[in-house]
Every structure is written in structure tokens, then in C-alpha cells.
Amino acid sequence: MSIVKRGSTFQLRRRVPQRYRSVEQRAVVWISLHTDSETVARSKADRAWGQLVEAWEARLAGDTGDAEARHAAAHELARIRGFRYLDVGLVARLPAEELLARVEAIGARRAAPDPVEASALLGGVAAPSLTLEKALELYWGLAREKTFGKSEDQIRRWKNPRLKAVRTFVEIVGNKPIVAITRDDMLDFRQHWLERIEAGEVTPNSANKDLIHLGDVLKTVNTMKRLGLTLPL
């Protein structure tokens, strides 16, 4: 890592690692450290390099064919560039100065605009089409704070009703993408439980718990994965 004074400002000069050559056209990068003090420059160099590596990693992830990873990478890359990821429809409604700031940021570090960064800053990465069963798989990790301090048996008893709620819903409407769940699907789920209550097979409390657990899974995934869906719950 080399710190060089160019004009009145110190800059970091470093060769691009081989790992990032597919997402960085330059062989050597120069990063302004925005100071004329060598001491301050050296204290800022590691952080500046770390932020650049973060951006490269996010862009590498953005090149993946996996929709979930690509969507997460777009959020991360937008964050590194100082923006919040927004869907293209919301980007289009931004005030002119905010939209211009995003457009200018795309080409600020490169000779030509990069399509991965453009998609991240302008909202061009579609939310992954998660099925109900995939959403449940993600839920366990996204809601892991709810199992802190619990024994294996307690975790099993916490998981089982959520497994049951999702499995029952899948039996009724199919393993649909959660973005495709409709109000009619929820009414069919409700009708299923109403008929079982009327037949004396279950209590209203059992039906309510299934609705609550299903809603918890879907809302948690929607929020934590930042999908921005309007769920018919």
C-alpha cells in the first residue's frame, strides 16, 4: 500500500487484486484521502481500501445468476455508495437532485458506467421470486434472535407450529411465490379452517394460531429481505 502526495492532497495507490479484475478495469487504483496531512492520510488509508474492497465484493455478488444473492448484493452496493436501494419505480419518483446524484455516482469512479452499479443505484434488480417453502427456509435465520437461550426442545416446539402453518397453506394454495399470494388465497385458507371448526375437528384458537404464524413468517421475510411487498394479510 503506497501513500503518495499529488498536488496538495495525499492519495492511496494500490494494485487491483486478481480476484477483482472481472469487475474493475483499472490495474492500479488511486484513492483520494482528502487531506494534506500524511499522518491523517495513513490513518484513513485502511478504511478507504476496505470500502473499495467491499464495493468490489458487492459487484462480484451482483454478477451472480442467483436472484436472491443478486438482490442482496444490489442493496449492499447501494449502501456502500451512500444510497438506500430503491425499486426502479421509487427511483423514478425521487426529486430531480436526488435522482441526479445517483446517476452521477454510477460513473464517478470509472471511465464508463458499470451495469451492475447502475442496476444497484437505479433500482434495476428485481426482488427474488421466493416461494412459500423457500421463505420458510429463510425465516429460520432471519428470526434467529427468537431462539436465543432456548434449549433444543424449546426450539423444536417453537418451529413446529410455523412449519405446520406453512405446510397447511401450501397444501391449499400450492407452493406459490410469495409475491403471487392473493387475497383469494388467504380467504381459501380461512375457509379451510372455518370448515374444520364447524366439523368440530379443531378449535378457533388453533385456526387463529396458524394465521398468526403464517403471517409472522411472511412479514418477517418481506421486511428483513427488503422485498417491499404488500402482503394480503
Image (cartoon, rainbow, N blue to C red):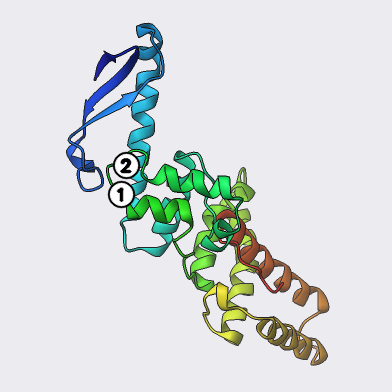
The residue that appears at 45% across and 40% down in the rendered structure is 81
Do the residues bearing badges 1 and 2 touch, measured as CB atoms within 8 Å?
yes
Name the quadrant of the N terminus: top left
Q: Nearer the viewer, residue 165 or 179?
A: 179
Q: Quarter-wise, where is residue 230 in the image?
A: bottom right
Q: Amino acid at mark 2?
A: Trp
Would you name the residue on which mark 1 appears?
60
Q: Residue at point 28% right, 47% down?
A: 112
> Is 69 left or right of 180, judged from the image as shown?
left
Q: Is residue 124 shown left or right of residue 27? A: right
Nearest the eye: 83 or 49? 83
The residue singled out by tag 2 in the image is 56
Q: Nearer the viewer, residue 155 or 15?
A: 15
Measured as percent of width and height from the top left, residue 94 is found at 60, 53
- Residue at 40% x, 53% y: name it: 118
Q: Is residue 81 above or below residue 65?
A: above
The residue under the point 17% across, 35% down is 27
List x then y, in percent, for residue 69. 40, 57
Which structural element holds mark 1? helix
Name the element at disc 2: helix
Amino acid type, label 1:
Leu
